[in-house]
Amino acid sequence: MYWFPAILILPYLLFLAKIYRNLLKIKPFHPGNGPGTFVSVVVACRNEKQNLPILLKSISMQDYPGELFEVIIVDDNSSDNTFEIASGFTGSSNVIAIYNKGIGKKQAVRTGVNASSGSLIITTDADCRMGKRWISTIASFHETLRSDMIICPVQIESRPGFFGRFQELEFLSLQGITAGSVLSGDGTMCNGANLAFTREAYLKHSGNVHDEIASGDDVFLLHSLKKDNLSEISWLESPETVVTAASSPTIGSFLKQRRRWISKSKAYDDWFTIFLGIVTFVTILVSISLLIAVIINPEFLWVFLTFLLLKSIPDFLILHNTSVRYGKTELMHWFLPAQIVYPFYVLIVAVYSVIPLKRPEY
């Protein structure tokens, strides 16, 4: 019976080993040719009067020629003066503010894309900020590879204490899995805070983003494109394209965000994503079960420690690789305590996700 946990963790080890091997192949992209693509930046937002001015300032400082990009702010039924802030912004002449023609982020993105003029669409969120070469680097990458979807790196702002470090570590792990799976041709996730795609690809696949589910405007688009053998999906590795998003200020808001993320999983039809999710969840359940077994019978301690060590090796390798690429190696000091907390966190989020959403959230 002692060997049974080793069998259960084997798929987890194989999957993460494959992802880690792909991460070792990553090479930074260096922009080459001058700009030539007209780009539309689409930002769907609701009640973002605090964050929107910071985002607009970041975009207004882009080194991409002003005549070659537009910024479309789609106000999704805000109850504050989000629309007035966007429409009254004077830092750039190419910012356009429009109202969502429906309700929810998916419809807001669709409204923005339909109103856009660019052949390349870049989406981000109102609580994000980026460097001045963000648009130009993504446009150059697109002109080089002509990908239908370009998945770009996202990091979250730092917060002090264990809670803040735990958020950053978890987000880094998600970024590592995102990059590694895309490079193997089995993209599992992406982040609409820093995502680019052709207008043509979006219009072709936007009917498959499951409007009935609040979250997933990005991932469902990715999965739909994966089914199309003619579509090219790429990971863009460049410090110039990193977008920094706001972290959750409280544990409550953090859990709500993760619940929103996991709520879309019931509609997944991508086998690789489903299988990876099952494998990860089974590994987490075995971790918790073995810990309970140790409490009941201390003889299971060596089984639990062996299982924890086996799980931690690929986790550490992926996190270390990603933290080095993002310049966040100091976070690895928090790896061990995060590993101990992580199984309970996943279980709490899984239980919490059963609670239905009352209204589409961002």
Image (cartoon, rainbow, N blue to C red):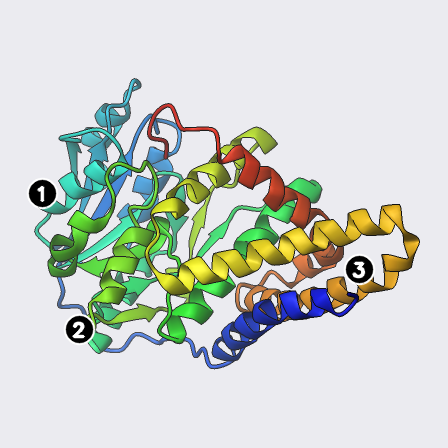
**x%, y% of residue 48?**
35, 29
Indicate which disc, 2 or 3, sits on the residue closer to the N terminus. 2
Residue identifier under label 1? 115
Q: Residue at x 48, y 37 (%)?
A: 259
Indicate which disc, 2 or 1, sits on the residue closer to the N terminus. 1
Element marked by disc 3: helix
Q: Quadrant of residue 71?
A: top left
Q: Residues within 10 Å of mark 3 (few under 14, many from 20)?
A: many
Label 2 amino acid?
A: Leu
Q: Residue at x 24, y 54 (%)?
A: 122
Q: Quadrant of residue 11?
A: bottom right
Q: Are marks 3 and 1 in contact (CB under 8 Å)?
A: no
Indicate which disc, 3 or 1, sits on the residue closer to the N terminus. 1
Q: Of the numbered discs in the image, which one, if any, rests on residue 230?
A: 2
Q: Is residue 240 above or below residue 127?
A: below
Q: Residues within 10 Å of mark 2 (few under 14, many from 20)?
A: few
Residue identifier under label 3? 304
Label 1 amino acid?
A: Ala
Spot the residue most to the front.
Answer: 1
